[in-house]
Each structure stands twice: as structure tokens, then as C-alpha cells.
Image (cartoon, coloured by chain):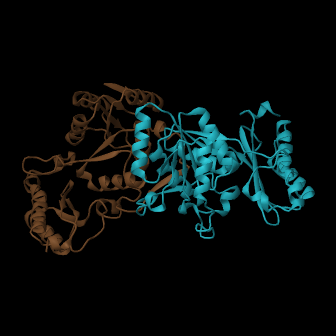
Chain colours: A brown, B cyan
Amino acid sequence: MNIITNNEALREQIRQYKQSGKSIGFVPTMGYLHEGHLSLIEEARKNHDIVVLSIFVNPLQFGPNEDFERYPRDAERDRKLAEHAGVDLLFMPVVDEIYPTGLSVTMLVKERVDVMCGRKREGHFDGVVTVLTKLFHLVQPDSAYFGMKDAQQVAVVEGLVQDYFFPIEIVRVPTIREEDGLAKSSRNVYLSPQERREAPILFKSLQLAKGLVERGHLKRDSIIRKVTELIHDETSGTVDYVEIYSFPQMVPVEPLQGDIIIALAVQFDKARLIDNMIISLGKKESQHV
Amino acid sequence: MNIITNNEALREQIRQYKQSGKSIGFVPTMGYLHEGHLSLIEEARKNHDIVVLSIFVNPLQFGPNEDFERYPRDAERDRKLAEHAGVDLLFMPVVDEIYPTGLSVTMLVKERVDVMCGRKREGHFDGVVTVLTKLFHLVQPDSAYFGMKDAQQVAVVEGLVQDYFFPIEIVRVPTIREEDGLAKSSRNVYLSPQERREAPILFKSLQLAKGLVERGHLKRDSIIRKVTELIHDETSGTVDYVEIYSFPQMVPVEPLQGDIIIALAVQFDKARLIDNMIISLGKKESQHV
């Protein structure tokens, strides 16, 4: 595995890949790799000659109340995991490499952000699209891989790529789950044994919603209420939100139609869990009523 | 000459160029081609296998008081000029092709804009960087060519490319001048015979400034005053501005050092003329005092 820390060396390596006609799959991360990341790498491996993994804790996407300094890092472990997963090129720049100067041009995300978790993370996605634009231009991948666990990020990135005609395919990689359906997360370890037994209800509530919608229950409020009630009744967690939008546009649709996302966040004692599901309905209301 | 009007056909053609190892020089324009554009094309021809010219009147860079609809267009004449100049691919999309939907992510130019002509054209350069980002992603050129007549645009574009690591070289092409030094412009025809005789004073005043600076006169205000006085004394025009900044950063420096721009705008009866000159000094003050 080739490890590169500066832009110029990266550009030169990418140039060589391109010259020899290699296709490039790109997995951008903030490191502290877990199974979710590994599934992105695995997916990229299937489709490309070369897999590039970036590890960069991006200061620009941290809010004033979010601690950039304390974000977990373990470069040595990440290196081993990346190598074992079959990464060809690991790009690990320092902050000054990616932000050598202030920005004369800034990027602002105007849509798809003021919902779900984004509502409380002002400026977060501005930082995400800024760093991804830089990384996309450095790596020049054919495809970039993102996990559907953070569906809002997928929506924002798809908007970016579509708006600005990036010559890159964004690949949505399904959420990795435990056998009982709980979405894998590094935060699951903070659940008490009792909470851990309750937590699969989150996925079950999404499945409930999916079943209802697919059987023609197309009223947002009614679906949201049923999901909220199930979580409230069967877990000790507090529902932070249950929301339904078109995906990836992230706007309310009524009656439900097209591709929709149902997303939720639940606060347990020491862990806040999120999960979501995409449901594909036809475009026309008449097909489902 | 290949004429393409839609993104997908353009992408396919670019893919073929890349696969056969051709280098691409790109000249983005709003059409109504004149000698300035032709000099950009000529410069691109020298350095690349393929020259791509785009003609797109970009609504996003017109202000509320600037008339997008009335911007001059002559597609048939442009086609002939482009073909004659040796353009390989002419990209002429309609507005809906470049802006099929609203933008979920917007770009804002924060530096290099609130000086010179940019001061009165709020939002103009936001539109410029937005359309160029789209065009750069579609055309994927090795180099893009811009005329130094619009030096502020060059500065903004260089900022964009540097900030976001576009894998594109920006080439500065010198201003084309009449024999008497007057910068060529489609607006020169609006000068009266008397004004036309006076107009070369603009270039002479820049040369005066250059001489002074190179002989060690490094005070901005003093240079600006001398240039303004010369234009005031020897022409019937009204000085709109004479400004001096570092280039391409567009910030005031005192004493003058490094690469600087001296730029001016003069209002004649029916024509507002602009001109500028870049002067390269050493980085260290001590070399010039």
C-alpha cells in the first residue's frame, strides 16, 4: 500500500494511474476506521482497478460546539486496516496541506441541509462539500463511495456532484447491520445491556413504516406518528426526530411518492443513535392509492 | 470543427480525447468573439492537441441592472470565426443545459472582488466561478486561457483553482493593443475622434507608473495621484478609479513589492475604458529602496 501525505505526490501518482488506464474508486473518510468504512472499501474494490482511501479530519466541518481536537484518531491502526482491506493508495494529509491559505471562494449548501441532523449542525455540510471538492480534484476518481448510514451526507454530496457536473459517480453503500437489525455504530458500545436489547426496535420501526407505505399508507404525519409511538412504547430512548422526505432532495412530499427517506434519531442515556431507510415508490400517485 | 450543444455529447467527446492521450486547451467565452478571444484561441493552439471553445452567455453573472437579454449574440459569425481560428470543439449549450435545476450548493467569492470594477458588480464573480466550475468539470482541460484585459477575473479564477485544487493550469494571455497602445475593446468604436486621439494616454499613464515603480517610487498614493493627474490633464475623460494592489491577491501593499497590478477605468462620453498593467518587483523591500 502506497502512503502519501502531500498533494503533489498524490497528483503524480494519480497521473500515472490515469496514464495506464486504471479506474479509480475513492473512499473519503475521517479515519478511526470501522466496519462501515471497510464495507465502502470492499465495494470500491469490486468495481475499480485502484482504491484510494483518504483519512483527513476536516476542521471545516466541525461546529463551534464540536471538538475537532478531541475527534478520535489512530493512524497506526487505520494504516493496518486499510492495508488489510486492500487499499492501494492511502492519502493522509495534514491540515496545512488541504488548507494552506484561507479560501477566496467559499461553498454554501443551501438545500438538503436544514432537516434531520443537519438542522443542528449549522455550517457542517459547507465544510463537507468544501473538503470533498478539494479531494475530488486531487484524486479524480471515477466513483466515490459513501455509506447510507449518513444519508443526509449522501444527499448533499449527490447535490454537489449534480449541480457542478463533477465527472464522478457517487455510489450509495447500504448500512451495515448487526444480525438483529441494529445499524452498526461505534456509539453502540455506550448502550446499557437493557438499551442494547431495545435498540433493534429502531430498525423494526423503519420496517414497519416501509410496510405501511408499500401497502398504500401515504400520509407522512400518520407514518411518523406510528414510528414514534413504537419507539416510545418499546424503548427507554427519547425520540429526537422521525422525519420523511423525498430522497435525495430532502423536501416534504404529500402524498408520499417517488424515492423517499424515513430517518430517525433516538437519544439513549449515553448514546444517540440514528438510522434511516430509503423506500422506492413509483413516481405517480395513482400507482399507489 | 465539432459543434456540441449538450453535456452528455461533450462528456463523450472529452472521454475520447482523454483516451487517446490528447491534451486539451480550453477557452471559455460569452461569444460575440473579437480579437481578444482569438488571441486566447491562438495561444491555446500553440500548447495543446485540442482546443475547446465554449460560448455561453451566463445569466448568473449578470447583475440586476445588467441586461442578460440584451447582451450581444451572433452565433453564426462566432461559428465561422471559431472554425477559422482552428477550434476543434465548439460547445454552445442553452441555459437549461447548464442550469437544469436550482443550485443546492452555491459559491461565493469572498476575496479579490471588492476592488476595481468588481466593487460595482455585486455577485458578478459568484456567477463567474459557478459557471467555470461547471465548465471545467465538463471539459476537463489541461489549461484554460483568460485575457489579462479583465485582470480581476484572472485573479478570481486563479483563486478558485488554487483554493479547490482544480487540476488545471490557468494561462494569462496579454492584452491585445492597437499600435498606439490603446487596449483593444469593442467599446473603442464609441469614442469620438477627439477621444480616440486621447485614449492612448491610458496606456501611457500605466507605463509612466511602471517606470516610476521600477525606479523605486514605491508609495501607492503618490503613483495613483500621478497617473490620475496625467489622465485628467491630457484627456477629456473622467477617471473612475486608479488602483494598485498585489496581484493576484488584490490587497493593498505598502511599500509596493512582489507582483502588483495598477488598474484604471476612465469614463469618456459614450465609452468607459479599462486597462491595467502587472509589474513584477522582487519580494524584498530592500532590493528596491
* Residue B9 visible (yes or no): yes
Q: Position of residue A283 (x, y in %)?
A: 22, 67
Q: Where is residue A281 in the image (x, y as percent from the top left)?
A: 18, 64
Q: In this view, does B60 lie above or below A73?
A: below
Q: Is residue A6 left or right of residue A78?
A: right
Q: Is residue A42 above or below residue B118?
A: above
Which of these two is toward me, A19 or A41? A19
For the C terminus of chain B, the image quarter is top right
Residue A83 occupies quadrant: top left
Q: Where is residue A222 in the image (x, y as percent from the top left)?
A: 15, 74
Query: Going 63% across and 56% down the picture, which residue do you hit?
Result: B32
Q: Which residue lies most toward the right here?
A: B233
Which of these two is toward me, B1 or B200? B1
Q: Which residue lies most toward the top here?
A: A1
Q: In this view, does B265 lie to the left or right of B157?
A: right
Q: Is residue B204 above or below residue A17?
A: below
Q: In this view, does B251 lie above or below A247?
A: above
Query: Going 40% across and 30% down the picture, which residue do you hit?
Result: A14
Q: Is residue A143 left or right of residue A236?
A: right
Residue B241 occupies quadrant: bottom right
* Residue A63 visible (yes or no): no
Q: In this view, does A2 lie to the left or right of B284?
A: left
